[in-house]
Image (cartoon, grey):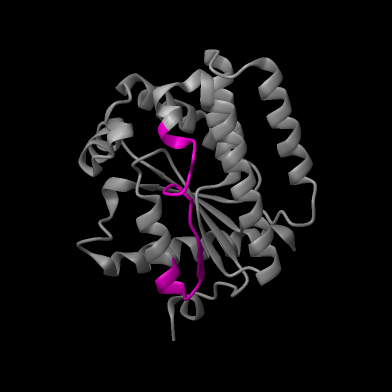
Amino acid sequence: MNLAQKYNIPKDAIITIAGTVGAGKSTMTQALAQALNFRTSMEKVDNNPYLDKFYKDFSRWSFHLQIFFLAERFKEQKRMFEFGGGFIQDRSIYEDTSIFAKMHYDKGTMSEVDYKTYTELFEAMVMTPYFPHPDVLIHLDGPLDSILDRIKQRGRPMEQDTPSEYWTEMYERYEQWISHFHFSPVLRLNINDYDLVNDPDCIEQIVAKIAQKIELKRELSR
């Protein structure tokens, strides 16, 4: 019996992992997928033609980057719909719109016209039948110092060259965003409360918390 059966998690569930850069979304996605015998929907970074350019010039490439991510995430939404669920998703489409695009618009690194085009496209996508909202959204958070340490430790050059003020602002925007997120139940996990690398058995504690959120959702919908 896998953990999905043990904790009565539906085989068609969609569980989305959200959190700022460095929070450990990919590690959590892989661990949960293995524990529940679910498929993964991973954020595509390595084949992104705009990412390196973006970190060198936010104003020039922010719109291009966000449109690329929006298209990739919508294709993943459609893929999950066609499979009938059973996915752990690395980062949500909501973060792109409510945090990243909004931050660049507010800071003047995305024009008003580009931001309007982007948000209208997002809203049109949300209205399609290929857009399943997650059964649970897991928000990985924790102290800002811990996040900055993780970004430093993984050593990606484009992230190391980015001023720490950028990560601080993103962190604060995540805190504001998750407080108002309403599309699905939210499970907040402090990244300092578990260690999936050195203590893989702690994944069962997380699965149990996911099951509680899904059961609460069932009860509220009755």
Residue at image position (64%, 63%) is 80
The foreground one among 134 and 121 is 121
Quadrant that contains the N terminus? bottom left
Residue at image position (62%, 36%) is 67
Quadrant that contains the C terminus? bottom right
The foreground one among 59 and 153 is 59
Residue at image position (40%, 34%) is 52
**x, y percentage for residue 136?**
56, 56
**x, y percentage for residue 193?**
28, 51
Residue 34 shown in magenta: yes
Name the outermost residue toward the top. 108
Residue 123 visible at all: yes
| Left or right of 179 on screen, residue 114 | right
**x, y percentage for residue 34?**
40, 72
Find residue 171 and report its image quarter.
top left
Residue at image position (39%, 24%) is 56
Residue 15, placed above or below residue 59:
below
Residue 79, placed above or below residue 120:
below
**x, y percentage for residue 135?**
61, 59
Find residue 177 and report its image quarter.
top right
Residue 115, placed above or below residue 122:
above
Number of numbered discs on residues? 0
Find residue 194 and report its image quarter.
bottom left
| Left or right of 62 on screen, residue 121 | right
The foreground one among 20 and 60 is 60
Residue 180 visible at all: no
Residue 147 shown in magenta: no
Residue 130, placed above or below residue 175:
below
Region of the chain picked out in magenta, as a range: 33-52
